[in-house]
Amino acid sequence: MLNWLLAPLAYGFMQRGLLAALLVGVLCAVIGCYVVLRGMAFLGDALAHAILPGVALAYLFGGNLLAGAFIAAVVVAIGIGFISRRSMLKEDTAIGILFAAALALGVALISSIRSYATDLSHILFGDVLGVSVNDLWLTAGLGLLILATIVILYKPFLVISFDPVLAATLRLPAEPLRFLMLTLLALTVVVSLQTVGVGLVAAMLVTPAATAYLVTRRLVTMMLVSALIGAFSSVTGLYLSFYINVASGAVMVLVATFVFLLVFLLAPGRGWVWQHLAARRQAGQPAAH
Amino acid sequence: MPEQTPPLEPARLEFENVTVAYNGRAALSDVTFQVPHGARVAVVGPNGAGKSTLFKTMVGLLPLRAGRVLIHCQPLGHHADCVAYVPQREEVDWRFPVTVADVVMMGRYGRRRWLKRVDAHDHEIVARSLEQMGITPLARRPISELSGGQQQRVFLARALAQEPHILLMDEPFTGVDAATQDATLALLDQLQTREVTIMISTHDLNLAAARFELVVLLNRRLLAYGPAKEIFTPQVLAEAFGSQALVLPEGTVVVDHCCPPADY
């Protein structure tokens, strides 16, 4: 068993990949709590796809890929806010329009690059084993920045998420806070690009947080449990992908989904099986008399 | 009538020609009245009369199209922490993972100190507010497990923790049990001794007449303002409630409130 765990670590790319996966797993899981509680799952997915044209442009012009990705995500986030506020359209419609447009633009740009197929698949589904030492430092730095912001602004973020009316009453700067939260989400998505890719980052944002939501009753504990599930899914996913030779991002998401299903069905007191049994026991009682 | 003689005490809350539009349609137009310091005011009117709109404007949630609201003689926004708002229960996400104590503590996040740590003084005030509303044993419970009456008390306790000068409550008597209604009224009595100005919206005209010294009768504009026994006349109520009001021959007015949902 120990050997099973240690053997992959003999490779430098596995060490770096593991660290990157761990960081991204925790980061997505923590910020994912806000995504789940504020109903931003679709927005998270849209931001992930929106970075595609940014990456492509940066690649074409030889710029920094992460910077390009981040700029594209922020532009799309602002665009969504602008369209939904300045028209009668609902936000999810605005998201749908810009998300598809950004994806199309990204594919169009990337298809003009020669090594199109491999590059696109790396961006779409991640390439955690290709993480360089520099990438790792950048991921760690940005990750710490995001987590520190969440810790420092825990109280105002809680209020704007739970009760916007109270936020207005307390005169919290709600709009800047909301924008900052969106920026943190965009940064998280960008940082996740290399491990799970734009296609699967939504799952890493939503699934661990949703799982934690099922078994916790306070935001702090939800974040901690979610982080634990995110870390477990990432690391387990990477090991499994190493041994069964399957795309790592996909396995990470599948592990997270497996944990979710397990909790959804079996969580003591609240799981589906538990409630089903309780209902049957109650229904059975009158017959016994 | 709108030009009601204002009460004599120094006014602390003034509405001057307040006009608010909601989704492009005027929800309130040209509303002018003054609330004296420490008064207890009931806001009544039919569904869609603009009761919630009035409150949401006061906390800065809806922009003023025209006119102004003065608190302590200063326009909205100059007094950061003196208005507390107890929302209608349907407006709260009861599945959010917070405990009763968490919600009440949120009342302490104002005062431009939301970056500072919660201190012993805050904990003391939260404990006192919980106790005052009789929900100390529920402090560690998640809000999803509360009954309707308990939910209401949590938000009352939070309003207390805010230590407001002005307390706004949107329909606090709709759909709560008698015990919660009594607790709410007792709280209002207590706050009045502390000179907190209180405004509530309600569908219950009897309660408004019996327990509130001033009544605002709204229907998109101010129809009447003053003590209930002066303004609750058949003519005014018929004007306010239209076909919802039935004026009986001997002068009794029956107001039908069968369906009191969304009120904007």
Image: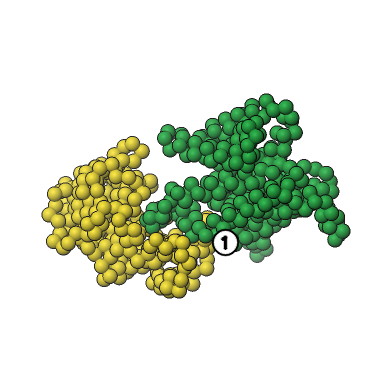
Chain colours: A green, B yellow
Q: Position of residue B37 (x, y in %)?
A: 22, 63
**Is residue B236 something that shows in the picture?**
yes
Q: Nearer the viewer, residue B26 or B165?
A: B165
Q: Residue at x 28, y 58 (%)?
A: B199
Q: Is residue A244 left or right of residue B149?
A: right
Q: Residue at x 24, y 55 (%)?
A: B74
Q: Is residue A223 left or right of residue B20?
A: right
Q: Is residue A216 left or right of residue B250?
A: right
Where the N terminus of chain A falls, by quadrant?
A: bottom right
Q: Is residue B107 left or right of residue A137?
A: left
**Is residue A92 something that shows in the picture?**
no
Q: Is residue A210 above or below residue A119?
A: below
Q: Position of residue A261 (x, y in %)?
A: 69, 51
Q: Is residue B161 above or below residue A96?
A: below
Please tell me how many numbered marks the rendered image carries: 1
Q: Nearer the viewer, residue A132 or A201?
A: A132
Q: Nearer the viewer, residue A198 or A139?
A: A139
Label 1 belongs to which residue?
Answer: A220
Q: Is residue B186 above or below residue A62?
A: below
Number of residues whose C-alpha sits closer than 10 Å to that of mark 1, classed few (under 14), some (14–19) or many (20 or more)? some
At label 1, the amino acid type is: Val
Q: Residue at x 55, y 59 (%)?
A: A151
Where the C terminus of chain A falls, by quadrant?
A: bottom right
Q: Position of residue B154 (x, y in %)?
A: 43, 64
Q: Nearer the viewer, residue A58 or A215?
A: A58
The secondary structure type at the circle numbered 1 is: helix
